[in-house]
Image (cartoon, rainbow, N blue to C red):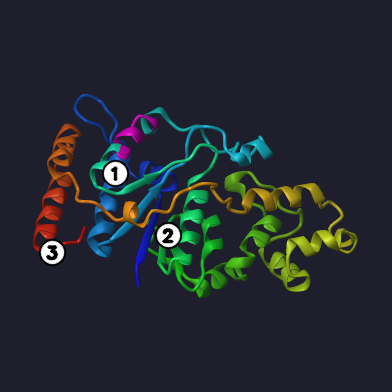
Amino acid sequence: MKVLYLLDGSAFLYRSFFALPPLSTSEGFPTGGIYGFMKALFALIKKEKPEYFAIAFDMPAPTKRESLYKEYKAKRPTMPDPLRVQIPVIKELIDLMGIKRYEVEGYEADDIIATLSLMALDRGFFVKVYSPDKDIMQLVCDRLVVINPISGEVYDRKRVIEKFGVPPEKLVDYLSLVGDKVDNIEGVKGVGPKTAVKLLQKYGSVENILRNWEDFSASFPEAKRENLELALDLLRLHEVEGLPFDEESLRVKQPDYERLKKRFEDLQMKSLIKEVENLSKITAQKSLF
């Protein structure tokens, strides 16, 4: 079975940046995010040897979710300048690696991954999504797993149920009830994880809660119907209209080894130059790309 690997570049970039101590070149250009991101990317490629691979990024333009709710992700700190200046370099390196890169104005990386995943599943692929965000776990099914690129933990259907108490298809309902502090999405006051599971066992879904609002609000008088409706809209992954699925473009191309080495020399990353050399030796022996 063909396997499509998808990486949430934006989510992973943040975690790569904050996970490492500040790094920079002798000229003072920050490189910690670049180093952490690329080190993990080389490790993934060496382990999985992907034939089909794409990396999705958020764009700085306002998203559709922000148009629905101005406070969406408002509590997240502003992107630090030392990270911001590294993003173009990371994207350049991805292109030199021969990996397909996506970003679509108005959509988040999660939406791009969801759209590509569903199209890949329709075409018989198995899909491996690398993301540290829990929202993406709503996609998990028999032929799609989510892997935390930092911890390496694999989330299949069984693991999602173990972690949240609900199956992947109910994760949006669950998060709508408990809220998501990371994205600044309010839950229902008085509803924690255990109560959310019990409510979904009783009502089946948030949509059914909304249909039975009088009964529900009798137990949770401080609940606001509009907040719950908004949470559903914010947490559901959106289809990116018109996003092409070209199987050949998703196939990993031959990396530009010489330009990669030159860029890592410029960035003073000797260990990553060795990664490029090791990768070129492997691909010379066996066609991985």
Q: Which residue sits at x=44%, y=41%?
A: 103
Badge 3 marks a residue whose secondary structure is: loop
Residue 74 sits in quarter: top right
- Which numbered dot is residue 286? 3
Task: Tell me the distance, in whole angstroms, between the alpha carbons under discs 1 and 2.
Answer: 17 Å
Task: Tell me the distance, in whole angstroms, between the alpha carbons under discs 1 and 3.
Answer: 21 Å
Residue hosting label 2: 129
> Percent position (x, y) of residue 78?
50, 32
Left or right: 25 in relation to 222 = left
Residue hosting label 1: 94
User: Mark 1 near mark 2, Cβ–Cβ under 8 Å?
Assistant: no
Of circles 1 and 3, the one toward us is: 3
- Magenta segment, which residues? 84-91
* Quadrant containing the N terminus in the rendered view: bottom left
Q: Residues within 10 Å of mark 3 (few under 14, many from 20)?
A: few
> Percent position (x, y) of residue 100?
33, 48
Magenta-drawn stretch contains 14: no
Of circles 3 and 2, the one toward us is: 3
Q: Residues within 10 Å of mark 2 (few under 14, many from 20)?
A: many
Badge 2 marks a residue whose secondary structure is: strand
Badge 1 marks a residue whose secondary structure is: helix
Task: Tell me the distance, in whole angstroms, between the alpha carbons under discs 3 and 2.
Answer: 25 Å
Amino acid on which the number 1 mark rests in the picture: Ile
> Percent position (x, y) of residue 203?
78, 69
User: Mark 1 near mark 3, Cβ–Cβ under 8 Å?
Assistant: no
Q: Main secondary structure of the magenta part?
A: helix
Magenta-drawn stretch contains 87: yes
Q: Earlier in the sequence, mark 1 or mark 3?
A: 1
Q: Which residue sits at x=16%, y=46%?
A: 271
Amino acid on which the number 3 mark rests in the picture: Lys
